[in-house]
Image (cartoon, rainbow, N blue to C red):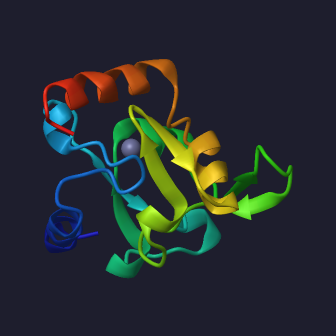
């Protein structure tokens, strides 16, 4: 992946995690990852259409996963695809937590541990400072 592609992906994401919406400015010492939505091991390439920005936590929890188990129904669901789906259709902020509105949203919140304690705490602090 070349530098121009990385720059394009970061600019397109407005320097935010495209899963949990954490702003890069909230973690200035840890550069957010340019992440493969469909991991290389599943045949995903470096085309910008398969790339998104992910914070360190979302990237670590997502790993190469494409699916997870919907905590409400127990069915296997795809994870959110920031390139082909709209965040607001699948998630909502319940300050400071993130709710999944659909099977895709619920599954992604669960697999990416979006409401893990320290992450919710950070979101609450950013909201209080008007930085989220
Ligand atoms: Zn994130």
Residue drawn at (48%, 74%), measured in percent from left and top?
A: 85
For this rendering, which residue is in front, 70 or 64? 70
The residue furthest front is 94
Q: Please indicate whether residue 16 sits to the left or right of residue 95 in the image.
A: left
Residue drawn at (15%, 30%), measured in percent from left and top?
A: 29
For this rendering, which residue is in front, 17 or 120? 120
x, y percentage for residue 57? 42, 35
Residue drawn at (41%, 26%), measured in percent from left and top?
A: 120
Q: Within the displayed image, which quadrant is ligand 1 positioned in?
A: top left
Q: Please indicate whether residue 29 sits to the left or right of residue 33 in the image.
A: left
x, y percentage for residue 105? 59, 56
x, y percentage for residue 93? 42, 44
In this rendering, is residue 104 above or below 108? Answer: below
For this rendering, which residue is in front, 103 or 40? 103
Q: Is residue 62 in view from this perspective?
A: no
Residue drawn at (21%, 39%), measured in percent from left and top?
A: 132
For this rendering, which residue is in front, 60 or 124? 124
In this rendering, is residue 109 above or below 128? Answer: below
In this rendering, is residue 32 above or below 122? Answer: below
x, y percentage for residue 103? 70, 59
Q: Is residue 38 in view from this perspective?
A: yes
């Amino acid at each position: 992946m070349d530098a121009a592609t990385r720059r394009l992906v970061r600019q397109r994401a407005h320097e935010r995690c495209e899963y949990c919406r954490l702003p890069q400015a909230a973690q200035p010492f840890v550069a957010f990852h340019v992440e493969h939505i469909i991991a290389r091991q599943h045949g995903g390439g470096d085309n910008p259409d398969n790339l998104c920005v992910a914070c360190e936590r979302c990237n670590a929890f997502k790993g190469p996963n494409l699916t997870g188990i919907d905590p409400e129904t127990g069915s296997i669901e795809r994870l959110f695809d920031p390139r082909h789906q709209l965040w607001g259709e699948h998630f909502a902020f319940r300050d400071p937590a993130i709710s999944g509105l659909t099977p895709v949203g619920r599954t992604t919140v669960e697999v990416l541990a979006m409401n893990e304690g320290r992450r919710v705490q950070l979101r609450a602090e950013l909201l209080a400072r008007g930085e989220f």
